[in-house]
Image (tube, grey):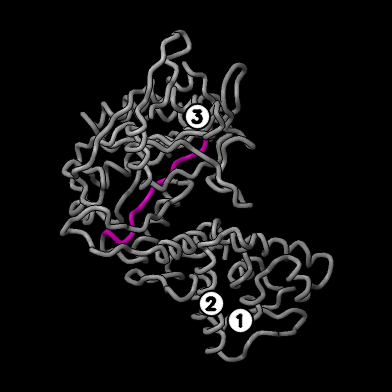
Amino acid sequence: MHFYIGAGADSAQKRMIDERKLEILTESAKYDVSCSSSGSKRANKPGGLGNASFGGICHSFTPDGRCISLLKILMSNECLYDCEYCPNRRSADVPRARLTPDEICELTINFYKRNYIEGLFLSSAVFDSPDKTMELLCETVTKLRRVYNFNGYIHLKGIPHADSAIMMKAAHIADRMSYNIELPSEKSLKLLAPQKSKQSLVAPMKELKEAMDYDRINKVRKNKVLPAGQTTQMIIGASPESDGQILKLTEALYRNMNLKRVYYSSYIPVVKSNKLPAVGAGLLREHRLYQADWLIRFYGFDVDEICGAEENLSPDYDPKCAWALKNMQLFPVEINTAPLAMLLRVPGIGSKGAYKICEARKFGKLDFDNLAKMRIVLKRAKHFITCKGKFYGSDSFEQVKTSLMLDGAREMQTQLSMFSDSSTALSVLTGEL
């Protein structure tokens, strides 16, 4: 089977992309999870195609569970590097393929017109040289915007060691870029990805951050650098770093690089190497890291409160429950008087719920029925709160631990069927606790 695509606006010729080539390059792209799209305000222009403003391309998942589709593809999986964990590494015996900038542009436009996709996530292995690879990626997105008149969402993967001038040119075209940290420490990078270095990954992130800060301070409106910001990804479990070390790095990246998201990808042993674990890290560990990440970004927690430097997150409890069980002397709190910062630390009360409570209690005292209508998860929260002085939780610490453990186990089972219950689906997708 072949996909027939137009050769350009001024040509009546047709070219075709072999389905096998598409299969290779889309399959190879699936291991990069840092492709969630949000935050861009790029609007359509007269005669253009696509729209990345609100109501266009936003989020990989919407709150009601709908999937927003991006074409996720590599330009090439032919790689100069030999990273131990990568299925596309130089020494891997896998089929190789490469697309030209025009082929990617025409494929994107063709799929968009057929309503298959709503945006593009474009990455590539490093072929020929880092500069050549980044140059062709930049040429692709530039053509999409200026020749093919595509105004939809574009997420571009940055290439380590590429010239910063090429990177900045691409950053004025794409909505979002990601330079993937890959591994949580310099030591692990040297062992498993010796062609990369911390400097080759952090330096471009810092340069992009400074350019975005300049646009913000000077109120630049047109041709902004990365209107949807930048993200990164870490592989979890391929190297021996603890969750505490990973979260420390995450906290520093949010604080110093102003990233939109840090993504965690659980290591899966897809290639054989005596430098890698024989068993994958498992999805539970990845899920716990996302929950801890949410606490850092939206709940006012410091990493040291969640997890010690050499510790791993508890598999039995989500990070907020684990913190609450260690700090039972702070509970229960009265729902009608507790400050917002404390409400955010109550298991079962998410960030939206905490703000709803603060607004609602301005008009009268709240009881447990009011909280149930606000969709507060009372089976957790009841052990940590009082309403009008009444307490309906358990006085036994062991019973509280058991209740939270069973509730957490049910939550993990439900994830495989995310859409059976809307509140559970939303929790799974967002990380709200």
Task: Identify the mark at residue 331; answer none if there is no mark.
Answer: 1
Mark 3 highlights which residue? 111
Please name the residue shown 65% across and 66% down the image: 340
**Magenta stretch contains residue 355:** no
Determine whether, in the image, residue 83 is placed left or right of residue 235. left
Q: Are marks 1 and 3 in contact (CB under 8 Å)?
A: no
Expressed as whole percent of the image width and height from the top left, the position of residue 230 reads 44, 41
Task: Identify the mark at residue 324; answer none if there is no mark.
Answer: 2
The quarter in which the N terminus is drawn is top left
Three-letter amino acid code at the position of disc 1: Phe
Expressed as whole percent of the image width and height from the top left, the position of residue 161 reads 25, 36
10 Å crowding of disc 3: few (<14), some (14-19), many (20+): some
The quarter in which the C terminus is drawn is bottom right
Expressed as whole percent of the image width and height from the top left, the position of residue 298 reads 56, 58
Q: Nearer the viewer, residue 178 or 332?
A: 178
Callout 3: SS: helix
Determine whether, in the image, residue 346 is placed left or right of residue 261. right
10 Å crowding of disc 2: few (<14), some (14-19), many (20+): some
**Magenta stretch contains residue 230:** yes
10 Å crowding of disc 1: few (<14), some (14-19), many (20+): some
Q: Earlier in the sequence, mark 3 or mark 2?
A: 3
Q: Are marks 1 and 2 in contact (CB under 8 Å)?
A: yes
Three-letter amino acid code at the position of disc 2: Ala
Callout 2: SS: helix
Q: Which residues are magenta?
A: 227-238
* Residue 155 picture quarter: top left
Q: Specify the farthest residue to the front.
A: 1
Q: Specify the farthest residue to the right.
A: 363
Expressed as whole percent of the image width and height from the top left, the position of residue 341 reads 61, 66
* Residue 188 picture quarter: bottom left
Up/down of 130 relative to 34, above or below: above
